Amino acid sequence: MKGVLMSGLRMSLFSTAIVASVLTFSAATQAQDQEVPQTLFTNVHVFDGVNEQRMENASVLVEGNLIKSVSTDAIDAPNATVIDGGGRTLTPGFIELHAHLMLMGPTLPAMEANTTWEDFAIHGARMAEMYLMQGSPL
């Protein structure tokens, strides 16, 4: 009887593993079939942070979170959401280079009067996490 139960348990686990594999493969296939959303910025000037001069009257194609194309020629992207930049300047993303992560009040005396050093540390850790999570996932 014990052998029959173990055999049935093995078959059940094996069947579960097969179903999980099929579902995982199916989900991966569906994800590949879905198109990455595109955004096309037109009528913009581009400052890339490398060249001194900005690129005038350009178009920028973004797929998902990645810049795919920057050109002064027209970019063909029929499924893209088009945003007319109105002659404004696009720049690369900026990052915070100076922050007081632990400051959480209007003045230092006000903070010290109502806050422990442990509270400062916890607040600083939470602020550091917030800044980190604002980054771009790759």
Image (tube, rainbow, N blue to C red):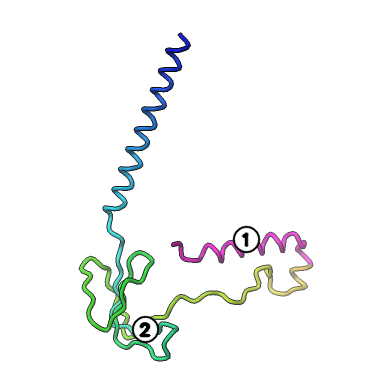
The residue under the point 23% across, 76% down is 75
Quarter assignment of residue 27: top left
**Callout 2 amino acid:** Val
- How far is disc 1 from disc 2 in space, using C-alphas? 35 Å
Which residue has dot 1 on it? Answer: 126
Quarter assignment of residue 56: bottom left
Specify whether 52 is left or right of 117. left
Provide the secondary structure element on which disc 2 rests: strand
Provide the secondary structure element on which disc 1 rests: helix
The residue under the point 45% across, 12% down is 3
Query: Magenta region: which residues?
Result: 113-138
Q: Quadrant of the C terminus?
A: bottom left
Q: Which mark is residue 46?
A: 2
- Between disc 1 and disc 2, whose residue precedes? 2
Specify whether 73 is left or right of 134. left
**Callout 1 amino acid:** Arg
Q: Is residue 115 above or below residue 2?
A: below
Residue furthest out toward the top: 1
Q: Is residue 72 magenta?
A: no
| Residue 29 image offset from top left, x and y in percent | 29, 48
Specify whether 34 is left or right of 97. left
Categorize mark 1 by other alpha carbons within 10 Å: few (<14), some (14-19), many (20+): some
Q: Quadrant of the N terminus?
A: top left
Quarter assignment of residue 45: bottom left
